[in-house]
Image (cartoon, helix red, strand yellow):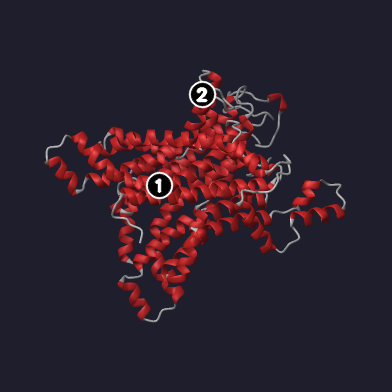
Amino acid sequence: MSNSKKSYGRVINQLKRNRRVKIALVILLIIITSAIFAPYISPYDPMAMDLSASLEGPSRAHWLGTDKMGRDILSRIIYGSRVSLLVGVVAVGISGVIGVLLGSLAGYFGKWVDGLIMRIVDILLAFPSILLAISLVAVLGASIFNVMLAIGVVSWVSYARLIRGEFLSLKNKEFVSAVEALGAKTPKIIFKHMLPNAIAPVIVMATLGMAGAIITESSLSFLGLGVQPPTPSWGQMLSKGRTIIRQAWWVSTFPGVAIMITVLSFNILGDGLRDALDPNMNDYK
Amino acid sequence: MIPILLGVSLIVFSLMHLTPGDPVEIMLGEFAQAAQIEEMRDSLGLNDPLHIQYFNFIKNALKGDFGRSIHYNRDVSQLIAERIKYTAYLSLAGMFISYIIAFPIGIISAIKRYTVFDDAAMIFALSGISIPNFWLGMMLILLFSLKFGFFPATGVGTWKHLVLPAITLGTAGAALTTRLVRSSMLEVINQDYIRTARAKGLRERVVIYKHALKNAMLPVLTMIGLRLGFILGGAVITEKVFGRPGMGRLMVDSIFRRDYLVVQAVTIIIAVTVLFANLAIDIIYSFIDPQIKYE
């Protein structure tokens, strides 16, 4: 325990020294805070239409302009962050749980269990994940829940491969043989003893997974397969702005900037975590 | 390979059978008679047990028969045949862009490790995977078509139509590949045989481009197969942004028309393409790296 505490401190120290990570963390905190307190900080009601203020450019009244319905874009971006973050967290949760579970089963039991799970992984890898997500949402119907489910279901594969690899090397470690010899039950060996030792790279992958999930959600929304109006989501705002990009560049520019900043911050954080958690992998891959 | 192909087809088949709504009712419209629907179901084989339907689906797919599109009232395979070349051009151009950017940047940042160039390359790599490609496409249209008028915003025809979509599609791949090229170069550069090459008095350029690069290529090559899947997935969205009449756009449009046989066919064609590309790369790999031999 003391050992893991020490390395925990080392990770924090290393993160503290990384200026990029600090900036990314501050940005993410701002985004998360504004998502939580959206009703208090957005200047306008994100759904309130005002046709007299349709397609106004950025001004003092509307910092980022208004859309075709005269709705304030800044307020819609602030509310849209709720959708993006929620989809990210739930989708990563779904894929993480499925992936870690199947990956540890495959790695621990080996033999036919491993063979079966890895065949499923191979099959899913043949599909570009965005394509499978599109098909799934098409079948399930477009809604925020189905988007989370689809992204979660198509992205567990990488977690499974990661955990399986970790388990394969952990299985031959002495402490695992020791708890096995002590007669510990299999679920206890897997979840209490082995998993905590394999979880660090999962955290890195989950952080990067947030970035990926937000991009996928926005792509699905862009295709009209994401969160349905009137709930504002970044991808959907972009999709609406596409047809009027000639008259009103701001409608499609700012939500894109919001996506980029958020995703970039998650990617920088994930990268920084990887460097800090794995001293042998100090070079970005 | 065969079990994976069967798995892929099974997934696609079950997806389309989980779809809510009776395809025949969609086909015949709201006012169809019950007898008419039943007759149609029979003729399409939809009353057969599921495993028979699956067997027939495989049998027909192997012959290149994916059924008829409800919307176009034409063979799905024909529709795809007309569009596949646009998707192929776009994907190839996108891959070309991503490699032509990734190689020089990746190599130089590995050689000039921890310099300003390396930092800038890393920021490029991180930004490249953080920009949704449809948004990048829209911004490119805004800047280079609407503002400066260098390239057409939509459509197909000349090479100019391909420039913006290819950049849109290639950027994320370029970012991913840059990181891969850099890290595999770094791994190779510290090996003994590189030191030997330098000690022999070879010029630095020869050491890097002849000795190091050749070996650093291997992991990059293995990724090409996976990258193809990534590119084809991205092409679906890029085609939508630029209004290119390719396979991906056909698929997305068909979802909204509930023309599921088309969706099914495109999905399976893309998955099978990715599988065969990976197989081909495995084979090429064994030629390049004599240490790998198939037992």
Q: Nearer the viewer, residue A143 or B137?
A: B137
**Chain of the residue on which disc 1 is drawn:** B
Q: Which residue appears farthest toward the left when viewing the image?
A: B200
Relative side of B190 to B168, left or right: left
Secondary structure category for the residue under label 1 = helix
Q: Nearer the viewer, residue B222 or A38?
A: B222
Task: Kindly identify the amino acid type of the residue bearing the numbered disc 1.
Answer: Met
Q: Residues within 10 Å of mark 2 (few under 14, many from 20)?
A: few
Q: Which residue appears farthest toward the front when viewing the image?
A: B63
Q: Residues within 10 Å of mark 1 (few under 14, many from 20)?
A: some
Question: Of callouts 1 and 2, which one flags the residue occurring earlier in the amino acid sequence?
Answer: 2
Return the residue at label 1: B223
Relative image position of residue A240 (x, y in whole percent): 64, 33
Residue A84 quadrant? top right
Marks 1 and 2: same chain?
Answer: yes
Q: Which mark is residue B160?
A: 2
**Chain of the residue on which disc 2 is drawn:** B
Residue A96 visible, this orientation: no
Figure label count: 2
Instruction: Note whether B216 is above or below B100 in the view shown.
Output: below
Task: Kindly identify the amino acid type of the residue bearing the numbered disc 2.
Answer: Lys
Relative side of A125 to A176, left or right: right
Relative image position of residue B273 (x, y in whole percent): 51, 47
Q: Which residue appears at 41% of the width and 38% of the height?
A: B175
Q: Which residue appears at 63% of the width and 49% of the height?
A: B264
Marks 1 and 2, how far apart in space?
29 Å
Relative image position of residue A180 (x, y in whole percent): 37, 78
Residue A197 quadrant? bottom left
